[in-house]
Amino acid sequence: MTAQEQFIAFLTITRKEIKRFLRIWLQTLVPPVITITLYFVIFGNLIGKRIGLMSGVSYMEFVVPGLIMMAVITSSYTNVVSSFFGAKFQRFVEEILVSPTPNYIIVLGFAMGGVARGMIVGIIVTVVALFFTDIHIHNLPVTVVIVVMTSVLFSLAGLINAIYANSFDDISIVPTFLLTPLIYLGGVFYSIDLLPEFWGSVSKANPILYIVNAFRYGVLGISDINVQWAFLMIGGFTVAAYAYCLNLLNSGKRLRM
């Protein structure tokens, strides 16, 4: 394929993915917004008044960046894992794989669909957050870049889960037993400075801790970890996930039901 044909193939897959989740927006865009709004009300507004300040800011301000990233992570991941596994289940993924489209275009196309959904949900949740607290962006480039990188990373992670899944039950195992615990233990609701030294060190093995703190730095200017190290961690995980996705598609393993 020529470069122009590859670009058209990339746009086609991306457009298909975006149309897919926009067509069922009541299922893809509304539920995460409702869930995060409940977090705002319960943890930020009601409980937050009793907690007071966290890292020098109100508790509501502290949790908002983490909750926005929670919505971005889950939306990006869910979009790709459900879409690609649906393609496997309905067996039309084989038509994509036997086409002249390079595998890296397929990976990027599905990933961009997840990024689009993650970004849209993140924007909606941010608008909702404005009803609960004022948001003043401390560093706009850091804020935007970290959201994009996070969306790409978890879109690729969703693609890996979809490739390995053999049933619809399999696509819920990772979010339930791995992704959700990592999010809740990733500094969304607390600063790791509150933890004992041992558990604080253990928490630093959680990649979502770096994501949440880097985004919190972009929004509020505060972070429990070095932001440059956070970018290196996220970038490294993203490159590894992309290479692994490409390897799985090139090998053809687990791509047939």
Image: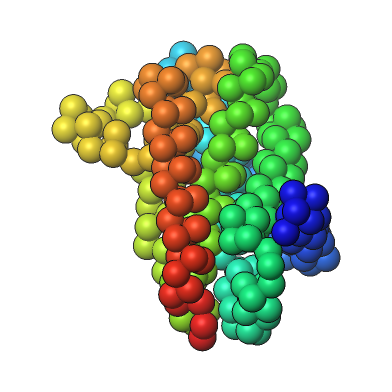
Q: Is residue 195 left or right of residue 158?
A: left
Residue plotted at (48% across, 17% down): 222
Tell me if residue 164 can be seen. Answer: yes
Does residue 169 lie above or below 76 as drawn? below
* Furthest residue in direction front, as rendered: 2
Q: Quadrant of the N terminus?
A: bottom right
**Front-most of residues 208 and 93:** 93
Q: Position of residue 2 (x, y in %)?
A: 75, 54
**Front-most of residues 20 and 255:** 255
Q: How is the image coloured?
A: rainbow
Mark count: 0
Tell me if residue 75 can be seen. Answer: no
Q: Position of residue 251 (x, y in %)?
A: 44, 69
Q: Is residue 195 left or right of residue 215?
A: left
**Front-most of residues 44 and 218:** 218
Residue plotted at (52% across, 36% down): 66
Q: Is residue 138 left or right of residue 159?
A: right
Does residue 140 lie above or below 176 as drawn? above
Residue plotted at (66% across, 19% down): 140
User: Residue 124: which quarter of the image?
Assistant: top right
Residue plotted at (68% across, 78% down): 95
Q: Position of residue 38 (x, y in %)?
A: 62, 48
Q: Position of residue 11 (x, y in %)?
A: 78, 54
User: Residue 17: which quarter of the image?
Assistant: bottom right
**Front-most of residues 38 and 65:** 65
Q: Is residue 220 left or right of residue 129?
A: left
